[in-house]
Image (cartoon, grey):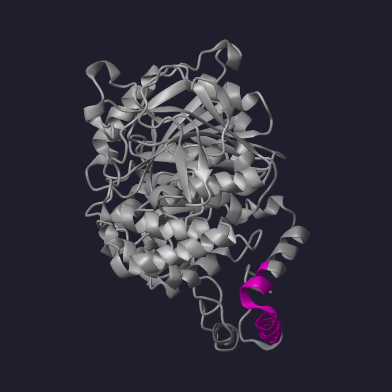
Amino acid sequence: MKIAIVTVNYNGKKDTLEFLESLRKLNVADPFFGNGNCELKVVIVDNASSDGSVFAIHQSFPKVDVLQTGGNLGFSGGYNKGLDYANIWGADYFLLINNDSLIKDPNLIVELVKTAESDPKIGLVSPKIYFAAGFEFHKQRYGEKDSGKVIWYGGGRFDWDNIGSIHRGIDEVDKGQYDKTEEMEIISGACVLIKKEVIEKIGMFDEKYFLYFEDSDFVKRARNSGFKTFYSGQAAIYHKVSRSTGIGSKITDYYHTRNRLIFGMQYGRLRTKFALFREAVKLILIGRSAQRQGVLDYYLGLTGGKNELMKKSTKIEYPLKLSIGIVNYNTPDLTVKLLKSILNTNSGFNPKEMEIIVLDNGLTDPCKNQLKDLLPRIKYLQSSENEGFSKGYNKTIRFSRGEYFLMFNSDIEVLEKGISELISAEDSFKGNAVLGGKLLFPDMSDQDSVFHLPSLKGAFKEYFLARKGSYFMYLPEEEKPTKVEGAVMACLLIPRKILNRVGLLDERTFIFFEDIEYARRLRKFNIPVYFVPSARFLHFHGGSTKRIGQEKANEHLIEASKKYHGRFYYTLLSFVLRLGQLFGRVETPTTKWDS
């Protein structure tokens, strides 16, 4: 059984370090798991903190996987990143827990999983949650003997008349009155165990909420889909309540007001919706400024994060400098060669600040058996079937943690300083460009490595005016980094902040045209692409696509071309290419753009 513990950090270094330290208490070597057969992964999602959190966490807890989002994505967006990462890892359960929490009971995971496993319809389980000592709402009510025994959540229900969660037992001293395990209408987003089947059926958190009510929405969708939500009184955690936002802050005012309207107007009864409307009018007239803004933004349809309420990060830290993604499809021999060339000491690969992710895209001829000696040094993923080029590489991107992401086709080999030259060039561009390396044939002769975006004008120049490189791939003559329209994805470096801005690869095609489509998207965002001739790589051209078979490859090529160009332009371009082949001044080898 695989269990992922996921938390989100935003400038909460002290709390997160204390939380991680408290995780040492957890016991997963329980007979319930079958002689302790439980694999645990801890994932910290950092929402672009500027307090040194990433460095401190990575230094103190090197086995913890730290993900950098590159921006404040809120509770919903941050947890979605962590859920996605853990899902790719293959988690059976996801324990979402706030970073301002502390583990109380060593058997927390055991008890929560026991409850979840007791009924296949149970999808979500929350434990009892205490106020951490000193963080009670009404400290004056309690004596020293009550410290750490005051309940914040002991189960609860949803108040559909007023749109809000009601915690059972809040502010009560625990005397065993809520020790039962039973079904509840609500769970607590501060700590909840989620079965993977829930994520598979209803998806993840709705990111329009950003903060507050995203857990209520998630529970509502889960229950509507037939899952039960349970409370377990047999295990507990401590919670430093409202450490992230602060009680009565502008952040709380804004998101609670806006999101209560979003949730209530979607799920509430007609009478409740009318009451919410009246309350919204009242807040517009006499509410605090953040509350008024929350109402206005709801009616303007503005969702997600509010930039004005968030501090801009001065410096974003990444746990790793580089992630290398490799997708293998029936090329285990080539994949092993590539990995050995990466791990060669002269390639520029530094295991202390870089990682390698290998995905077996289908089980026809997987490379795992040939990687036995290398597995401790790489992260290995497996898909049950071939999902195609873009989906495969997107999965490795989503499972990566580096500031830069470097794509390698499995038919690449890294030559001396190939990796370090790319990183050095990217650093000189301050992470604001996409880079391609220089490709060579196995006999060390030059290989065309870049391209112009395909067009009718380019095809005419190539065929009828004999201007090489106007339509087909070419190789720049300069010996320094050269700006180009696009570079071959057999070897392409993309900084994380560009991925966050432009997005992942287009998954509408199985294979072909993904590099051209991405180059066109980069142009729309005014992001430059550079060819770096000093970064050299061998390329066994077509080593991957040959394994598909020529007939199948042609089918994918035509399909991709039609989707990229559109049927009308594809037909027109095909006509010009045919004329060029018949009457043109040059005879150009067929490439993947030649319809």
Residue 582 in the figure: left or right of residue 269: right
Query: Which residues fall within the magenta stretch?
Result: 560-580
Above or below: residue 149 compared with residue 275: above
Image quarter hosting the N terminus? top right
Residue 399 in the figure: left or right of residue 482: right
Q: Main secondary structure of the magenta part?
A: helix
Residue 360 in the figure: left or right of residue 15: right
Q: Is residue 464 visible?
A: yes
Residue 65, x across and y down, in percent:
40, 35
Which residue is depicted at the point 70% across and 39% down? 363
Residue 427, x across and y down, in percent:
28, 55
Image quarter hosting the C terminus? bottom right
Q: Is residue 438 visible?
A: no
Above or below: residue 482 compared with residue 498: below
Residue 547, x across and y down, in percent:
70, 50
Residue 573 forms part of the magenta stretch: yes
Q: Nearer the viewer, residue 396 or 571?
A: 396
The image quarter in which residue 481 lies: bottom left
Residue projecting furthest to the right: 551
Residue 575 forms part of the magenta stretch: yes
